[in-house]
Amino acid sequence: MATRADSRAVKSLSNSEGRKRFVFKNFDERLTGIESKVLTVFRSLHKVKDEPSQGSTYLKDCLVESRELNTAADFILFYEEMLPFVQTLPLVVLHQDLIFSKLISGLHMKARLSLEAFLWLISALSRDLLDDFLPFLPRLVNSILTLLRNGGQKEPDIIEQIFLSWSYIVRDLQKYLICDIGGILRDTLELRYYPGKYINKFMSPSISFLLRTARDEQLEIGIKRILSEVADPLKKRGGVSLLYHVMRGTSVHLHSKAGQVLRFLLKDSTLSFCDHFPQGADSIVEALSSTLQSICEDFKAEELRVMWNCLVEKGLKVYDYPYLVGLVRQIVPTYKDSSAVLDKVLRLMLCTIDRPSTANEMKSIASQWAPIFSLNCSSLLSFLPELLAKDKLILKAFTSNILSSINNMILVSPEDVIPLLLSLCESEQISHDRVNIIDESKFERIHEFLEEKVKKVQTNIENIGLAQIEEAELAAAWGAVKCFPYFKVDSSLLICFKNTLIQHLAASVEVNTFSAPELMWQSLVGAALRSCHESCSSGRIYHLRSTGRLIHSDLEEALSLAKSYKSCVQVLSPVADYLDFVYRPLLAKNDISEACPELQANNAEDAFDIFSENLCHSKKDVRLMTLRILCHFETLYPNPCFEEHPPMKKLKTEVIQKSFPERNVLQLLKAVEEESHLTVSTATELVRGIATIRMDLSAGRIHDAYVPLVFKGMIGLFHNRFFDIWEPVSECLAVLMKKHTGAVWNDFVQYLGQCQLKLEVLDSHSENENYSISQKHTGLMERFNSFVLPPSDSTPTGKVVSLLLKTLQKVPTVAQSRASDLLPLLLKFLGYNSENPLRVGLYNGGACRGEEWKGLLIQWLTLLKLMKNPRSSCFSQFVNDVMQNRFLDHNDAEIQMSVLDCLVLWNDYLLPHRHHLENLIKPKELREELARDLELLQGHRRGSQISFCFSCN
């Protein structure tokens, strides 16, 4: 009887039209379809038969089905002998050795017509036995090898039957086989490397299926075994085929594990795995190259992204950099007109220069690549910023090359020059006051370019003033000014530009004529001032005048600018740096012990009045720079006084002089502001410093002139996000308000009012101040805007208001005595016209919403409770009416209870009813309270209590 394979073979002959429709295929053509059938076993979406027939086994079902299709003598004999032993699974397990032996004994060419049935029965037996079938695999492989050697390798039908059956066995036993990849590779060694390329090709899908589905450690074991096998040249083809199929997914896509496999293959430990073999790692490299070549031939370019990524990752770690340096030097002249090639070569350069570790090696590379930087190509525009981001060792070696490229770029792309120069100059910054001079006088074009940018803006300012100068010109001038100290350019031009800016900015402020925001002009003044100081610190101006005269004149100018533009951190910063890093070292160097007149005690109090507002500024940089400046003024000490001590061991008239604080209070504040990262130890240190200020205040060891500064400095610390210091700051502020009420109260009320006013605006605006600066998307403008408006991270305004109210709660007697100042702020917070509130129902509801507002309301109510009786204010009755008629029926029980506490304190007649009213507010007590005490509604006390109770309800 013809088998299913025979019928399929006959049908496959009909592949043409006409009389000669049936054409017999040759051997290779008949083998072509076998691989796709084998692959289908592992990719098919058809559901596998879950269970055998009820009460049967897979082997019995297959045996019965095959009996209907096969009448060959060998199969009939097996059927009659084995049918009694396959009825149930226990019988199959019991007689498994006998059944398997009978099956493999039929795998020979004389039983050709029964081979397909026997192979399918072996597959069915594996499904019944599962892991019990694993010991039979070596015998099965040997039987297949014998069958192939005895003529089966010449029959495509037999080859197809063998490997389809084998594939189903591997698929069904996958769960068990992947636990020992080394074992299955060992058992199938001869079959995988059987002579004849098509046998290798048909074995690879099944073994690769196991490798892909195995755990990572088993996958690595399997790959290492395959690599050790391909060290034998005779096994190279089979190993390549297997590695190819491991990474291959479908016919059009790589498998998802391809990247993982390839990365493992490219590891140094993998490549050196076979060093002890005769051919060493060369055999592995050859096998890997052949595998990648096959993948490149069979897949489209877009599908190879994973492979290229892995190869690039490996290339980035290459150690043979001298070869790459020479390779780059050879490639660039050949492909200098191809931007695509140059882009990739420049990327290779960036990777290569990360490898050398000595300055001499880097200088050698820079000299070899110098011609590349003289090219006029667009690729350098994206290459140079990445090169400038490298470490200082690389930049030092390539500085001349970079300047050469920038020097040429001035002619073709001048708008890109200043951002590159800025990046280069920033790498040459040594400290706040010193810079490295880029001693490259041969690039005069750069010097002329910088001078031209500054001269252009200066000329425009002198001719037309500040009114018609564009922001882009300002940005260019700013960049040039920043670069001046790093080059040997005319410093007198910088000084003249600074003086011109100062003169015209002062005049424009009076008439308010600006083309760009005023902050931009102030920031440009600050940049010019810093560049002048950096030039001075480099020693290029000191020979013009005597040191003493220079110190006094420069200091006078710096302080004058700081006072004129006290809220501009771009001006405050260079002034503070000058005082810290230039002025003070010069005093020590020249033995000038006496402070300059501008910093002496008689000028200190005037400076304190001018700069005090900065200490409560929301931006930390403004507060810190101001403190750095103020710390240079001569310290003021309180007047010596005497305090009596109790008559213990001393006489009553014996006195002791007060001690002065060890550190200036401004220095303590500066130490707190300078901390940028809070740890347990630093937090303890900061709290200790704040406690020192509090104790000095309590003991009267601080001069009265410092009191407003300390007061505003403490408020400024509320803007610091280190919440660990907020409570000590609040306590210190409370001591200050209690001891120096008259000196600080008005400032406190004013600041609290400003913060509450700012809260009203925050619903529609950003928390940070929003200056009208254009957002142009050029690199230079972005850098300039970042300079003008540096990022700031401060405490939200609502939290600051809460901290201020909590501070007031610590000094309730002060708050009660100044109720006439606080109640208008409360009414303003509640949405009323604080100057002339008309009626309770007339208020701005838009300003009274949100969780933050509700939290602040609770803080206000807590303060009112502590004030006990603020009747001295003309607004006290109106506040009482607001509490009773607006907030007593609030839907928040906490607010209701706080309001009730306030009303009870202000209205004595409510004291007997306090407990009753509290129960009316509590949801759990309300029903019981109303049922138990209806007398409150009968009106025998006061009529107003009826509405009062209903409002509570």
Image (cartoon, grey):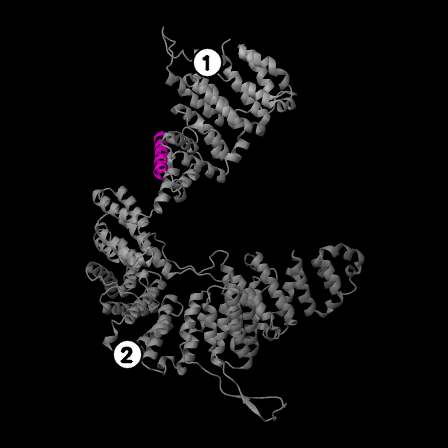
Task: Report the amino acid beneath label 2.
Answer: Thr
Q: Which residue is mark 2?
A: 547
The one nearer the camera, 166 or 940, is: 166
For the stretch drawn in magenta, what is the main secondary structure?
helix
Q: Residue at x 25, y 69 (%)?
A: 496
Horizontal and vertical percent for residue 220? 46, 39
Q: Is residue 715 left or right of residue 488?
A: right
Q: Is residue 288 left or right of residue 131?
A: left
Residue 207 sits above or below residue 671 on the image: above
User: Which part of the image, by quadrant, shows the C terminus?
Assistant: bottom right
Whether the residues at callouts 1 and 2 have beta carbons within 8 Å, the answer is: no
Residue 571 location, quadrant: bottom left
Q: Name the secondary structure under disc 1.
A: helix
Residue 17 sits above or below residue 261 on the image: above
In the rendered structure, which segment of residues is drawn in magenta? 278-301
- Distance in Å between CA atoms under marks 1 and 2: 106 Å
Query: Looking at the image, is mark 1 or mark 2 earlier in the sequence?
Result: 1
Horizontal and vertical percent for residue 350? 31, 50
- Residues packed near mark 1 inside 10 Å, few (<14), some (14 to 19) or many (20 plus): few
- As drawn, the label of residue 266 is none
- Residues packed near mark 2 inside 10 Å, few (<14), some (14 to 19) or many (20 plus): few
- As drawn, the label of residue 8 is 1
The one nearer the camera, 583 or 12, is: 12
Task: Report the amino acid beneath label 1.
Answer: Arg
